[in-house]
Amino acid sequence: MENTRDTFYVTLRNRLATLNPGRTVVVRGIVRPGVLVDENELTTTFQPVDTFCLHWTGMRVDTGSALPLVTMECAIRYATAGSAGNGGMDRGRLLAAMDGELTAAIGEQPRHAVKCNYAGVSVGVAAVPMATNIFWGYVAFGAVTTAGERIERVATVEVFSYQEAGEL
C-alpha cells in the first residue's frame, strides 16, 4: 500500500508544481512544492495555509481476483487566510484557485501512473518501477468551513492499485 501512496503523492505533487510553480511551502528550512503528506511530517500544531495536505483515511481490499484490488481514500485538506496585500479579503478567490488546481491535477490525463517503489530514494537510489499501475477517480469536494481568519476545505479521491506479490 505504501508504494501506491507514494506514487500518488509524487504524481500529484509534480502535476501541481507544474500548474503553479509558485505554490511552495517551507518545511524545516527547505522550500518544497506546496503538497505535504501528513503521515510523513513531524507532528506539530502548525496547520499550513496555501498548501495541500494529504491524509489516507480508508482502505478496502477485494481479494476476488488473481491480484487483490486495493481501494484507498485520500483526503486532501487545504486552507487559505487570503493575501496580506488584500487584508485577507480575497480568501474565497484563493480557495477557488486551489480548487481549480486540484481539479486540473487529478483530472489531467492520463489518470494513472506506473506504481513505483520509493523506499531507496532517501539514500540516493532512484525509484523502482513496479509491474502494475495506480489509477484514481474524480475529486469530490467537501463544504468550505471557517476556522478563525482561514477558510478551508477537504476534498477526497479514491486511489486504486493491484497488490503485487510481496507488497505490503
Image (cartoon, rainbow, N blue to C red):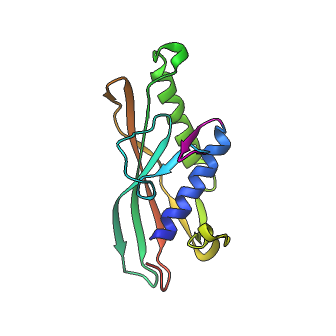
Residue 84 image position (x, y, % from top left)? 51, 18
**Which residue is rendered at x = 55% and y = 15% of the image?**
85
Residue 137 can be seen in this image: yes
Which residue is drawn at the image coordinates 53% and 59% (left, top)?
Answer: 8
Residue 100 is situated, as x and y percent measured from the top left of the image, at 54, 35
Residues in magenta, as a range: 22-30
- Along the line of sight, the residue nearer the viewer: 16 or 136: 16
Give the quarter of the image for residue 80: top left
Q: Is residue 8 above or below residue 48?
A: below
Q: Position of residue 146 (x, y in %)?
A: 32, 27
Q: Is residue 120 placed above or below 89 in the rendered structure?
A: below
For the point 57% across and 52% down, the residue is 12
Between 139 and 83, which is closer to the camera in this rendering?
Answer: 83
Q: Tell me the quadrant of the picture where the N terminus can be found.
A: bottom left
Q: Position of residue 65 (x, y in %)?
A: 42, 82
Q: Quadrant of residue 78?
A: top left
Asked if residue 27 lies in the magenta stretch, the reply is yes
Name which quarter of the figure residue 20 lies in. top right
Q: In the picture provided, is 138 more to the left or to the right than 117? A: left
Question: In the displayed structure, would residue 4 be above or below residue 28?
Answer: below
**How many labels were placed on the picture?**
0
Residue 111 seen in this snapshot: no
Q: Residue at x 66, y 73 (%)?
A: 125
